[in-house]
Image: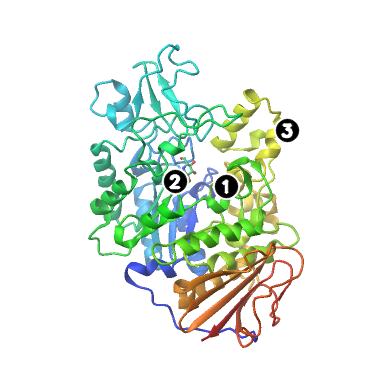
Amino acid sequence: MTSQETHPEPALTQGRDWFKSAVVYQIYPRSFADSDGDGVGDLRGIIGRLDYLSNLGVDVVWLSPVYRSPQDDNGYDISDYRDIDPVFGDLDTLDELLDGLHARGMKLVMDLVVNRTSDEHAWFKESRSSKDNPKRDWYWWRTPRGGIEPGTPGAEPNNWGSAFSGPAWEYDQASGEYYLHLFSKKQPDLNWENPEVRAAVYDMMNWWLDRGVDGFRMDVINFISKDPALPDGPKADGMLYGDGGPHYICGPRIHEFLQEMHQEVFAGRDKDLLTVGEMPGVTVEDAVLFTDPAREEVDMVFQFEHVALDQEGGNKWRPKKLLLTDLKKSLGRWQDALGERGWNSLYWGNHDQARAVSRFGDDGQYREVSAKMLAAVLHLHRGTPYVYQGEELGMTNMTFGAISDYRDIEVLNHHREATTHLGHTDAEVLAALAPLNRDNARTPVQWDATRHGGFTTGSPWIVVNPNTNTINAAAQVEDPESVYNFYRRVIDLRHTDPVVAHGDFTMLLPDDEHVYAFQRSLPDAELLVLGNFSGTARTADVGVPAWGDAVQVLGNYPPDAGLRLRPWEVKVFRRAV
Ligand code: NOJ
């Protein structure tokens, strides 16, 4: 094998399939860049970093919510869908951001949070105002269970727990009824059975598309169709509440609702738009249906299987060691299932997950090489890759001290429930929280080595990781060997080599506990990707001499022919066939 780089012709992916050669970058605005010194990131901060994004080579920016919001769940609780929260800016600044992205050839995808609103949204205020208000039925109101004093434990209409601890129901004293909230009590669930709700949501989506945005990332969109009977869910030993999931995950009308949304919002628009549905608990079988272009639902979904493999029973507060064979089995199954029909999204991290290099790589001695290896392995799968802010710098998890260092409602509520109702000590809860809590990913982007990492001139809303001294954008942008510049090369490969965007996928060495190996194939070209997921040298025995004349097109060590991999090494070979 030789080590020169090849320069294949551009993939020229156009039309419906444009997103197959695209890379998406996620911005979590609170933590990206603060322009006004209030300690919270904002739209003008993003505008100041557009050249950084354009230089990275990404095609699309997905912006986590910036709408008006009481910020109970950092903007995933929206009180006005058609305005920007003052902490982030205003509509004019959003338009300026959109223009700035478009001028650089990038698209803007907004977050769409319509499984629920904030309890401070005008719709909910009306709904709550009386039992006969015309919007009463826009949310899920139910009477207390009989025989128990309303508002006391056990009187909730069913046994469902909220994802943020406690019951999924809040008692409204004034009307004597409960409302459903799958997340915090400030996030009441909308009733999608009501056609007026659906029409109002579609109207709002059309308003944003008419304004020029290029699509939506749809928050827990597979929760919008609930079994209207709202039956109790199974309750595991040791749990305080039942699991309502079987009655709202990909519920009875979900495909109908998404097809209707497509007709009412996206159909007939003469523009390349992107739709990605966040779908916890989605199965591969359902994902094929959601993403089959002929069914006109969404372009791709975020599935959660591979980010639950390092937890006992899918409980993120009970972390366990990840087996590489499990990871390959899971991702390989998704590659196979969505190979002919449908399309995958690819991610290691986002604002709800731990930092990729800390979770799947080595954030100590091999931080840089392992961050690069992870980038290459993920991006060279078949699907659309997502880069979460700071991942391109190899940013790591944060070591938090006391519970008061945390900001995430999920963490704070869990800590309260576990210490007050489950008998756990503070130290036990903090230890369990450390590896997978969401604040790991929410510490600010590390722009430079100055105070607060160049994120803000004020006091940051959450602590900046002290390793900004060594891990930061300023140091990496100019360094050709940095993680950032490796991401540029990986992204460029998807843009220029059709086998990355369109090739078939074949998993190799499924039983190897250390090497992640796969092949991508088109009739005239093949890629071989070998990633060492360990800090020890390994050999990937994938069938030389068949690959003997291939060219190494990407690697994270000085090139060296052959199938021997140094610690956390990745090698990517290409050959014409
Ligand atoms: C999914 C979002 O990604 C997450 O950040 C949020 O907390 C939940 N939806 C509930 O709002």
The answer to whether any part of residue 30 appears in the image is yes
Name the side, left or right, on which 401 lies relative to 247: right
Label 3: few (<14), some or many (≥20) within 10 Å?
few
Residue type highlighted by circle 2: Phe
Q: Nearer the viewer, mark 2 or mark 3?
A: 3
Label 2: few (<14), some or many (≥20) within 10 Å?
many
Q: Tell me residue 35's x, y (percent).
A: 50, 51
- Determine whether label 1 and label 3 are within 8 Å by CB: no
The CA distance from mark 2 to mark 3 is: 36 Å
Which residue, given by chain and number where applicable, does mark 1 sit on?
Answer: 442
The answer to whether any part of residue 456 appears in the image is no
Q: Tell me residue 444's x, y (percent).
A: 58, 50
Q: Residue at x 62, y 23 (%)?
A: 421
Of label 2 and label 3, which has the lower sequence position? 2
Name the element at disc 1. loop
Q: Tell me residue 357's x, y (percent).
A: 65, 57
Which residue, given by chain and number where applicable, does mark 2 sit on?
Answer: 88
The CA distance from mark 1 to mark 2 is: 16 Å
Identify the image quadrant of the N terminus: bottom right
Q: Residue at x 45, y 12 (%)?
A: 148
Name the element at disc 2. loop
Of label 1 and label 2, which has the lower sequence position? 2
Q: Residue at x 64, y 84 (%)?
A: 3
Residue 553 position (above or below residue 383): below
Name the side, left or right, on which 200 lies relative to 307: left
Which residue, given by chain and number where applicable, does mark 3 sit on?
Answer: 427
Residue type highlighted by circle 1: Arg
The CA distance from mark 1 to mark 3 is: 22 Å
Q: Tell me residue 231's x, y (percent).
A: 40, 29
